[in-house]
Amino acid sequence: MITVSDKAKEKVAALRQDAGLTDAFRLRASVAGGGCSGLSYKLDFDDEVKPMDQEFEDKGVRVVVDMKSFLYLAGTELDFSDGLNGKGFFFNNPNASRTCGCGESFSV
């Protein structure tokens, strides 16, 4: 399962509204090769659910993850920070053995 913090929920709702997206658009979380630690996180809105996608809903936010990415993201919480130490979404990923300083990449 992928969970969403209250702050992330608020930011997702604001971004969806600013972009004029309907509720048909889900938040797609994925993992791609790259970044300073080997794997990097990606977030986007998507109105298509593919046959092998995993779909979760937490706090009213629907999150879609492809099966390959789910292997790396299982149990992850999506959070958002607007503090002095960095602004943006970040992943509290229990599967990551190492993360980079910016929080955008990780390794297992």
Image (tube, grey):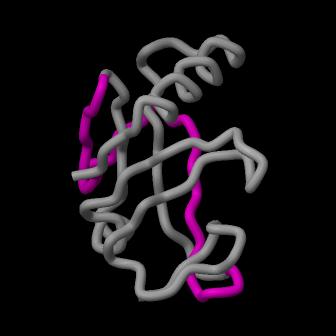
Query: Measured along the vertical axis of the image, is residue 39 above or below residue 84?
Result: below
Residue visible at 46% across and 52% down? 29
Q: Residue at x 42, y 19 (%)?
A: 24
The part of the image, by quadrant, that contains residue 35 is: bottom right
* Front-most of residues 87 and 13: 87
Using the rendered view, name the quadrant where residue 23 is placed. top left
**Is residue 99 a member of the stretch shown in magenta?**
no
Q: Which residues lie in the magenta part?
A: 35-59
**Residue 9 locus on image (x, y percent):** 46, 28
- How far from the left and from the top, in percent, is residue 97? 42, 87
Residue 83: x and y, percent?
71, 43
Q: Residue at x 28, y 73 (%)?
A: 71
Compared to residue 51, the image places residue 10 above or below, namely above
On the picture, is 83 further left or further right than 75?
A: right
Quadrant of the image containing the C terminus: bottom left
- Taking depth in this image into account, of 49 and 80 the one nearest to the observer is 80
Instruction: Answer with left or right where residue 103 lies relative to residue 95.
Output: right
Left or right of 93? Residue 87 is: right
Residue 21: image x %, image y %?
Answer: 58, 16
In-front residue for pair 81/13: 81
Q: Hey, which quadrant is residue 12 in on the image?
A: top right
- Residue 42 magenta-drawn? yes
Label total for image: 0
Q: Nearer the viewer, residue 106 or 20?
A: 106
Q: Residue at x 71, y 15 (%)?
A: 18
Q: Residue furthest front?
A: 84
